[in-house]
Image (cartoon, coloured by chain):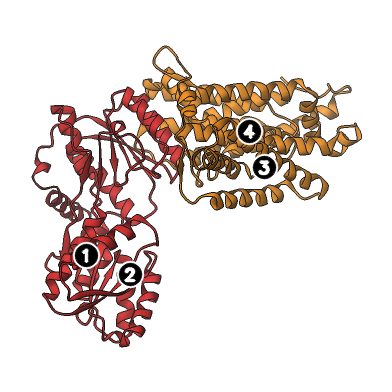
Chain colours: A orange, B red
Amino acid sequence: MNARYWPLVATITIFVVAYALAVMQFPALFSTRVLGNLLTDNAFLGVTAVGMTFVILSGGIDLSVGSVIAFSGVLVAVLVSQLGLHPLPAFAITLLICTCFGGTMGAMIYYLEVPAFIVTLAGMFLARGVTFLLTQDSIPIDHAFYDWVRQFYYVMPGGGRITFNGGLMLLVFLVGIIVAHRTRFGSYVYAMGGNAQSAALLGVPVARTTIGIYAMSSFLAGLSGIVYSLYTSSGYPLAAVGVELETIAAVVIGGTLLSGGVGFMFGTLIGISIQGMIQTYIVFDGTLSSWWTKIVIGGLLFGFIVMQRVIIAASRRDWRTKPHPEPAPSG
Amino acid sequence: MKLVNLLALSVSTFAVMGSGAMAQSGLEGMTIGFSQIGSESGWRAAETSVTRQQAEEWGVNLQFSDAQQRQENQIRAIRSFVAQGVDAILLAPVVATGWEEVLSEAKDAEIPVVLLDRGIEAPEDLYLTSVASDQVLEGRVAGEWLVEEVAGEECRVVELQGTVGSSPAINRKQGFEEAIAETDTIEIVRSQTGDFTRAQGKQVMEGFLRAENGGADICALYAHNDDMAVGAIQAINEAGLAPGEDILVVSIDAVPDIFTAIAAGEANATVELTPNMAGPAFEALDAYLNDGVEPEKFIITESRLYTAEDDPEGEAERRRGLGY
C-alpha cells in the first residue's frame, strides 16, 4: 500500500477500534442519538476544519479561525437583533467581510513573505478584539427565521436527529472533498504543499492560490460562526476560544501532514469524530476529568507526528529504490 | 484529618438544609448529570465538591462534566446526558443565552433540568426550577446586621463595591441601602469599586482612610465580597487602627479567610453565599420525580449571617476542605 494512505487508514482504525471499545463499556453509545449529536455538536468545528485542511495541505496554518467564528456569530447577532436586519442579508454581509479578511491575510502572507503563523496570529487578536468592540455581552437572536431553520431535521430510527447544522457540515465536507480531489484549485493546493518553489516553476499561480486558500478558510470560519449562532441562537464574544487549535488537531489526527502536500479531506471528518467521541465517552463515564479530552488528543497528536516522520522517511526510500516513481496522486 | 473534615462538613450541610435532608431515599440509584462551568473560583470548586457530597448522601449516581468555561462543551454534555437517558440534569450555565434548542431536546426526552446559581434567558417551561441566591437579600442581611449592631448611634459607612455593572455589585449595594434606609443614623459616606479583588480592596481602603481623617471618621466598612474585606483589613491595620473594633467590617460570601479574620476579631460578620445549590435541587427533583410536585420556578437559597458567635475557626477549617 502507498505510504500516503497510512495516516488515513490509521485514523479510521483508531476511530473504529475506540468506538467499539467504548460501545462495549456503554452500549447506549451505539445509538443514532449519539451519532446525531456528534454531527450537530461538532458542526461548527467541522465546517472550520474543511478550510483548515486546505490551509495545512498547502503548507500553511490559520490561527485566526476561532476568533473569526466568534466575530461572525456576534456580527450576525448585532445585525439581526440590534439593527433589525433579516438574517439572510446579515449572513451575506458577514461572509463577505470574513472572506475579505482572509483574502487580506493571504495577500500579506504571499506578497510580504511573512510566515502564515505570524499573519494569522495577528488576525486572531484583531478579530477577537473587534468582536469585543461590537459587544461585551452575549446577544440573543430572536428571529422567526432561526425558528424556521431549526425545524429542519431528519429523525433517524432510534430518535437521533440530523439537524440542519449537522447536514450542512456533511455538505461542506462533500464540497471540500470534491474541491480538494477533483478541481484544478485542489491540485494547486497539493502542489504548493509538496514544494512551493517547484509548484511555481510548474506554473501554479501561487499568489492567487494563497489568497484563495486563506479567503476560503476565513469564509468557512465565518460560515461556522453562522452555524454557531444557529446552534445557540445568540452571539457570544467569548465563543470558540481555542477552536483553532482543536481544528488543527482534528486535521492532523485526520492524517494530513503538517508539512503539507499529503492528506485527505475525509480524514479530517474522522479526526473531528474522534474528538467528539472522546468527549461523549467522558460525559458517559461521568467520573473522568474533562481534561482527559486534551490529554488523549495530545497523545494522538504525538503519535501521528511520529508516524508522519516515519512515512516521510519511508517515501524517500521508495523514491531512491524505484527506477520510475509513480506520480503523486492528486487525490 | 480528612475524616474530621468530612464529618464536620456533613454536619454543616445538614444544618444548612434543615429538616429536608433527612428524607433522602427518593433519588436512590438515580443517575443525574451535572454540567458545571469549570473551576474558575474557589467558590465554584466548593460548589462542585458540595454537589458531589450531596449526591453521595442522596444515593445519586452523579455524572459530572466540567465545561472548562465553554458553552459549546456544556451543550455537548447536555446532549450526551440526554442520549444516555439520565433521570435529571443539573446545569450551572456559563452564559445566559443560547440554551433553548438543547433544553427543548431534554424536554422532549422528558428529562427535568434544574439551573444552579445563575439564570438563563429562555422560556420558563424549558427548566423545572432554578436554584440561586438572592443577591439583594445578601446585601439586606449585611445591612440589617449593621443596623442592629450600632443600635441607633451615628455611623459613617464606607463601601467597597464589586466590579462595576456586575449584577452582584448592583444587587448587593441595593440590598444594603434598603436595610440602612430604615434608620437615619447610618449613612454611606464613600463608595468605590474594589473589583472584587483583595489587592484593589486594600488600595481603595487606603484612599478611604486618608480621606476620612486617617480613618477616625469611619465607623464601619461594607464590602461586596470577603476578598476585598480581607484586603481592607490589612489597610486598616497598617493605618494603626483596629479592624473589627475601631472600624466594623461586614462583607458577603463566607470564604475561609474571612472566618480566620472573624476568629482574630478583625472582621465582624459575613453573609454566606452557599455553595450548596445541589441540596435544594435534589429536594425539588425528589418531590417532582416521586410525588409529581411541581416546585416553584425560583428557589432562593438561604443567606445566612455568620458572626464571631458561630465558631469561625471551625467554619474556616470546614470550608478549606471544600476547595475554596
**Residue for badge 4:** A92
Task: Give the residue drawn at x 53%, y 29%.
Answer: A43
Q: Quadrant of residue A214?
A: top right
Please report, as a chain letter, where disc 3 is located. Answer: A
In the rendered image of this protein, does residue B25 appear above or below residue B18?
Answer: above
User: Do the residues at discs 2 and 4 belong to one chain?
Assistant: no
Q: Position of residue B40 (x, y in %)?
A: 39, 53
What kind of residue is marked 4? Ala
Q: Is residue A176 left or right of residue A158?
A: right
What kind of residue is marked 2? Leu
In the rendered image of this protein, does residue A220 appear above or below residue A166?
Answer: below
How many residues crowd mark 4 within 10 Å: few (<14), some (14–19), many (20+)? few
Spatial CA distance of label 1 from label 3 is: 50 Å
Q: Position of residue A223 (x, y in %)?
A: 60, 33
**Residue for badge 1:** B270
How many residues crowd mark 1 within 10 Å: few (<14), some (14–19), many (20+)? many
Spatial CA distance of label 2 from label 4 is: 47 Å
Q: Is residue B15 left or right of residue B2?
A: left
What kind of residue is marked 1? Thr
Spatial CA distance of label 3 from label 2 is: 45 Å
Spatial CA distance of label 4 from label 1 is: 54 Å
**Residue for badge 3:** A62
Callout 3 secondary element: loop
- Looking at the image, which is closer to me, B29 or B204? B204
Callout 1 secondary element: strand
Q: Is residue A144 left or right of residue B137?
A: right
Q: Residue furthest top?
A: A157
Please report, as a chain letter, where disc 4 is located. Answer: A
**Residue for badge 2:** B160
Q: Quadrant of residue A222?
A: top right
Task: Give the residue drawn at x 40%, y 21%.
Answer: A24
